[in-house]
Amino acid sequence: MTELAKTYNAEAVESKWYPIWKSGNYFKPRSGKQNKSFSIIMPPPNVTGKLHMGHALDNTCQDALVRYKRMKGFETLWIPGQDHAGIATQAVVEKELFATTKKTRHDLGREEFLKLVWEWKERNGNFILEQLEKVGVSADWDTFCFTMDEIPNQAIRKVFTDWFNEGLIYQADYIVNWDTVLRSAISDAEVDHEEVKGAFYHIKYPLKDSNDFLEIATTRPETMLGDTGIAVNPADDRFKHLIGKTAIVPIANREVPIVGDDYVSIDKGTGCLKVTPGHDFNDFEIGKRHNLPIINILKDDGLLNENALNYQGMTCAEARQKILVELEEKNLFVKKEECLHQVGHGQRSGTVVEPRVSKQWFVNIDQMASEAVKSVENSDMRFFPKGWENTFFAFLRNPRPWCISRQLWWGHRIPAFYCDGCGHIWAAEHDPEKCPKCNSAKLHQDNDVLDTWFSSGLWAQSTLGWPNEDAMKEKQFEKFFPTATLVTGFDIIFFWVARMMMMTLKTTGKVPFADTYIHAIVRDKHGRKMSKSLGNGIDPLELIKEYGADAMRFTLAAGSGYNRNLNLDPERIAGYRNFINKLWNAFRFVHPFLSESQEQMPSLDRLAPQERWILAELNSISKKMNDSLDEYRFDDACAAIYSFVYDKFCSWFIELSKPILYGENQEEKTRRATVLRFALRDIVKLLHPIIPFMSEELWENLKNEGEELLIVQDYPEFQKELDLPEEQANMNAFIEIISSIRNLRQSVNLSPKEEVPTILFSDNEKLCQYLELNKKSLEDLARAQLKIEPTPKKRPQKSLSTATELCEIYLPLEGLIDVEEHVNKVKKSLEKAVIEHEKLAKKLTNEKFMNNAPEDVKAEVHEKNNLCLHKINSLETILKGFE
RNA sequence: GGGCGAUUAGCUCAGUUGGUUAGAGCGCUACCUUGACAUGGUAGAGGUCACAGAUUCGAAUUCUGUAUCGCCCACCA
């Protein structure tokens, strides 16, 4: 037998097993005893992505679920994928292009540029996928899907075309969030509002044919170049007589109407609002109501255009300063009031977003949104934790048209076509050759691409072949759709969960997944977001290198329940690395005795009480693990198995087994080795979803001849016949006694080696029987020469002594004891017990409690009170002995 | 402005429908090179469960209010 290393070598084991699983097709679905499928779609990372802690957590949770369900006998499929990430990828390639050749994408032209992006993707796109393997991701790589693959292409073209024909998708001149760096529209969800310092500028707008003027406050004076109206509240006595009159926009010298609109608040600002329909969302609405013209003063790069007169070519900031100067010169500037206000910033570019009117494609999501809401309301799809459904509802109960066109090149080109002959516009699943109206062959396709989330929204179905019938058959759409669980972070509930729900419900009539588990966001140990600027980011691959993938996974799983934040402290990972090492050494201890174990477990009645006990504990833990994993409580599952392995298995069962295994009784030895092996088998099975690598490595040594890899073994479940509460109660008493003896020994600094005579007094027959039966183990673990006797009238005087609820313990060590100290200690225990008793007694004498509390609670209190009294009695007797 | 959440040991967090002597990990203290493991063992210290009320026989847990912090949403001149 080979010598095992003292510390577990994670790297060697990880690089050994992953290829075996992968090439052995263990990640592929196989039918199991459940006769049910379990499928998950991986939230596709960006091609530009690099693995971060968020991915590590997300994929650890998914992998734990997938491995768990696979072992439970579900036909399990985890579909990996990757997102083309329109903006991010295009930006990276443009940057690289400019750095190397000083060229822009416009210099290359669309076709050439896209060729470059594809090349870049081939070169760099696999990076994150390799990193995922290091985490242990057991996805079926053969089903890997890229958002710009043929099938997803078909899906988006079909949906776009269908919805265009239905009128759900339409083109409109509409005010959108314009990102001046990307030179593209972005959706509402892609705008982050940040508080910035600004100011209200009060400006006079002269009235036509009058010397009077209106004072107007604005945070953006430069937009006055696009003003086409003034609005006041029709109920405002100060101004209502002016409705219908004309004002003059300074600088632009434009005559604009004064309109009455309820939107204007009487008590805000000056009560007068300048209306700039081209560059403000509200003004756009007001403008529509009053037929005000729209003047666009911005180019796509955010510089002022020809409508800005003398200010053409300037940035907004420059123009603002100069306009204020000009107003001052004209005596139209009143005052400036500093203020804080919210300004939209592009999520990708970080630049200030300009509301700007342009022609874009929109989806009317009103109907879809309400269907999606309904599906969650009636639990067709359930959020874990449930609270997140509020976030989901908040977004979908107030739906706004979704702007789906982006002025980019990398992405799904919008399948809308324009006839140059007759001007007809239509959508088509396949590139048309002629105009369906006038037969003209002079056509062109829309230049824009679709929002990335449009394709992601169809991911649950397109990865399974939809809408291509052959592909659906091949990928077993019927079997795996809808998917079981979506695992993701809360930051993408709007972007992705909501869109998938809407789009999939609309196109298939089914929810895309039955459950959504929303996990926490990984933060640093102080709860701060990991960011480049703070330099507090943690690289999962570094963690894997230092502590092993299993330790990192266990840490992440142990931190994942229904919480919002996961504050990651590297010291915690070290702690769980130690746990893994502990298990490794437990195995190392059992290892030499494995050859003496039997293939079959003896029947329960032929086992020793403590052997039955460890199996009972294991059974409880199996139940706990199943229950916890079923409801995505990875934290509970980890805590349960962690304490079982440390406290029950290592501290007690292995320690209790040592004398037997090193002893002479071959029958006992064989039996104990067998139980140890079976316990370890169950432990590695239970742990496999969380720490797949080490568990598989151990399994290799624990399995029977001909058994398959651990990854496809049955997951342990609760077994009625192993529910042995009496065995557990006995053992708890046993443990308490040993701890008490150790405690007493420690209080006089007794060497752990020294054996000491110890007397146990108890009138509890069952307990005495049990203790007698396990006397030798008790003596070994407590280093005691033990006598167990019925409680006598006269106890030994001045002994080191204490009491549990069931017995009294005496160590006759008269000379060694610091009497005063010991008496104080006993008094302290007594005080505690008395307080406890008082509490219980108060309940028992409380009429209302006795009338109202349920029977089992009453019985429990009663029982506790008796035990407590017994303990008090014993402790008082002990104290008397010292008087 | 609206919503959601948090506040429990020095730190990071559990505590499910009210009934525990309020738990864990890390850290801390003392002792221990005991034949799996010092990435270890044994024992221990440490909490008015943010604050104030209310409901209840009984509240960390339910309700109301206050304070502090965090996040999300929102077009307020």
Image (cartoon, coloured by chain):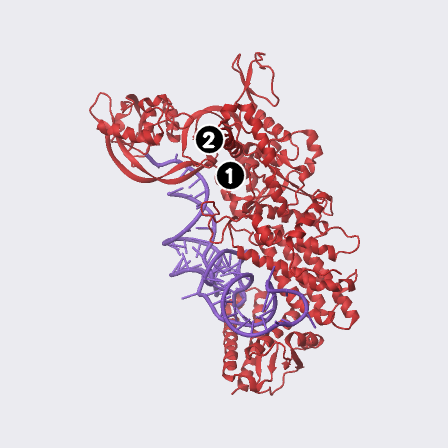
Q: Is residue A669 left or right of residue A245?
A: right
Q: Residue A538, how many percent across, how many down?
A: 52, 49
Q: Residue A770, how many percent across, how many down?
A: 69, 74
Question: Could you tell me how many numbered marks the image carries?
Answer: 2
Q: Residue A222, how many percent across, how many down?
A: 32, 29
- The chain to which mark 2 is attached is A
Q: What number is the disc on residue A182?
A: 2
- State whether residue A208 is above or below residue B10: above
- State whether residue A174 is above or below residue A644: above
Which hue is chain A drawn in?
A: red
User: Is the residue marked by circle 1 packed among few (<14), some (14-19), or many (20+) residues within 10 Å?
Assistant: some
A487 and A326: which is toward the camera: A326
Chain letter tied to purple: B
Query: Looking at the figure, which quarter contains the N terminus of chain A?
Result: bottom right
Label 1: which residue? A494
A877 and A375: which is toward the camera: A877
Residue A134 seen by the camera: yes
Q: Is residue A45 left or right of residue A354?
A: right
Q: Is residue A425 left or right of residue A358?
A: right
Q: Nearer the viewer, mark 1 or mark 2?
A: 2
Three-letter residue code for mark 2: Leu
> Which residue is at a point 47% across and 45% down the rendered structure image?
A532
Q: Is residue A836 left or right of residue A269?
A: right
